[in-house]
Image (cartoon, grey):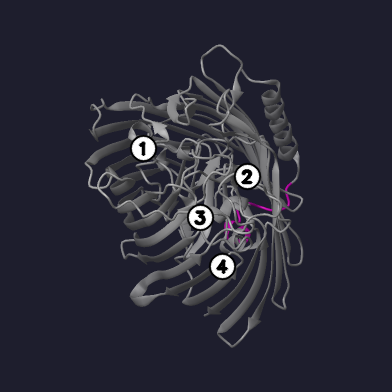
Amino acid sequence: MATPRTLLLLALSSCLALVSGIASASETIARADTVLVEDLLVIGDVGGDASPSAVVFTEEALDLVNPWNAGDLEAVIPSAVVSVNSRGESLLMMRGASERHVSVSLDGIPLTVPWDERADLSLIPLDGVASLRAERGVTSLLSGPNAVAGRVDLRTRDRGGPRTLVLFQGSSGADFAARGVLRSTPRGWNVVTAASYRDRKSLVLPAGISLPYHQTDPDDRTNTGLRQASALMHATRSLASGGRLALLLLATDAERGVAPEGHLDEDARFWKLPLVRRGLMGLTYERPIGHDWNIETMIALDVFAQDIHPFIDDTYSDPAPVQPGDDYERGRDMTAHGRIAARRFIGESSDISFLGQTRVTRHRESLVVDGPELDYSQRITSLAVESNISLDRNWTVRAAAGLDNAATPSTGDTPPQDPGTAPALLIRLTRDFSAETEAHLSLARRSRFPSLRELFSGALGRFVTNPDLMPERQDMVEFGLTTAWAGWNMGVTGFSSRLEDGIEKSSLGDGRFQRVNRSRIMASGLEMAASRRLGPGLTLALHHALLDASVDDGSGTEDRPAEDRPAHQGALLIEWKNADGWRASAAGRWVGNRSSADITDPVDGLSELGADTWLDLWFGRRIGAGAKTDVAVKIGIRNATDEIVWEQTGLPGAGRTIVVGVEILGR
């Protein structure tokens, strides 16, 4: 049943929509190219299917927060929190949903690791990435299976003339990085080639923090070193048939430490990952057939390898596991993706699309040195049909139906599982009040199948396996509006979702967890986003979300808070620049109270984390060194006020970090 707060949020959403809808607009979202260049935040889709639940950040907007990897993008994704877990992974949660409900892709090629059904953003470098598109909720069934809460697609730039960029960066914590990007146009191809290297000794601790265990150095966080090298090539070519061919190659090789949980004594994890390696190759081909059809196909191969070495204590001085029978974790993954989509245009403004998509993954795992190698595999297939029907010049209906299927042919040393199916449904009604103002109402049902790791992994003794996990099923209703009004580009969305058989961690009271299907996880909220050019060289972007999330475990007792769902979250981004090359920006972020997993809590395995705020500041100047070369010097202060920000219980984020960089841009 909806809470009073939920009803208030949805009522407020409707009121805001009504006020905005009758207001006269002065700018137009439909002028995609102009808005894309001038505004930090574009609300509504640009260059694709209209979607008020989508936001786009351009290359210049991403530069405002100077991200090195995808984990640095929290400030620019509305309704999103990036949290570092006890495995050291940076995970994206959107609208309070689990990180496994959000898909992450690069140029349309999935980056999610199927074994765990999530992507570690800290190991996804942004080499060559020029823009970001984030969708919240279910906007289409053509995005494939398991995208229950939304998706984020990173895009390289495949247009424009030749360009060369070289970046050197250093920061406190002995963190040094270099990146090179070359954009060229050989023989009709648009090619982006990039490479980077990063070497970090540790993360900086905020002043005044007190961790009861595993932290003797007052300045540097224990075991947070990182070394990573990466390379990328993205090549596109327009074909004589009117089609387009795109090739993506990505390779990363890293080793890193995992910070121990500072609130646990002997139960803390003492891990290092001496190997995290990935190779990704994807090919996309699209072309029109006649005047009415458009066909798109994608194939990709993803090879992933990861080793985890546990240690006895926080000195990390005992030998790495080398003797037969020593505990460790060695995982090797190979995943093939295939997708074919056909779109049939009907008249001037209607269409129907057909999708067939499959993902086949194999995971091989060893848990002791010279021990047996367990073999797991999973196949997820999605079929969908979706139609956009223009009722008249102002009303559009998007109706979609699909069927997802999951099978696990190999299940290690556990009994085989029967295949499962789940339907997917979407209906979305859109009303254009003017060229500037659009409202939508949507109802959607989507499911997520448990990942192989959720079903079968004990996570080196921290989890008890549960191969009987069932798929999650989510029903969502959403109402939203986008408009350009009085110089503002803005949107507001109210949503309410019910997740049946939601998968969450349950504390067993002995220092271990088990993933179980909760009876029901309910979430309702209101999200707002806006951007505006305030004056010459001065631009502002803002997003804020309110969330009410709770869990009904079927016991008949009072609902409890859902884990890691903050009561509110948001960001304020401001940028100033002038004709002399000076530039300054500020990114303020805030996250409200939330409950975090804590195995020391005897009641429900949760502890309360208070609200956090932090501020990043950047200053720089671009200097023309020559007719075709610019040099930019920048200085940044991450977490400028040195706040103690908790990622999860016992896991603090980095304190004040000074960053100095030099960028050389050649045209």
Question: Could one spot residue 7 in this view of the protein?
Answer: yes
Q: Residues within 10 Å of mark 3 (few under 14, many from 20)?
A: many
Q: Within the image, what quadrant is residue 54 found in? A: top right
Between the C-alphas of marks 4 and 2, the distance is 22 Å
Foreground disc of the pair 3, 1: 3
What residue is pinned by disc 2? 646
Residue type at tag 4: Ala
Q: Which residue is mark 4?
A: 174
Secondary structure under tag 1 reads: helix
Question: What x and y, as percent, mark residue 576?
Answer: 73, 66
Q: What is the x, y in percent for residue 658?
A: 65, 66
Specify the amino acid type for callout 1.
Arg
Residue identified by numbered label 1: 453
Instruction: Looking at the picture, tell me which residue is in the foreground, 295 or 508.
Output: 508
- Say few, some or many: other residues with alpha carbon within 10 Å of mark 4 (under 14 / 14 to 19 / 20 or more): some
Q: Residues within 10 Å of mark 2 (few under 14, many from 20)?
A: some
Report the residue marked by disc 3: 223
The residue segment tinted magenta is 25-35
Q: Amino acid at mark 3?
A: Asn
Q: Secondary structure at mark 3?
A: loop
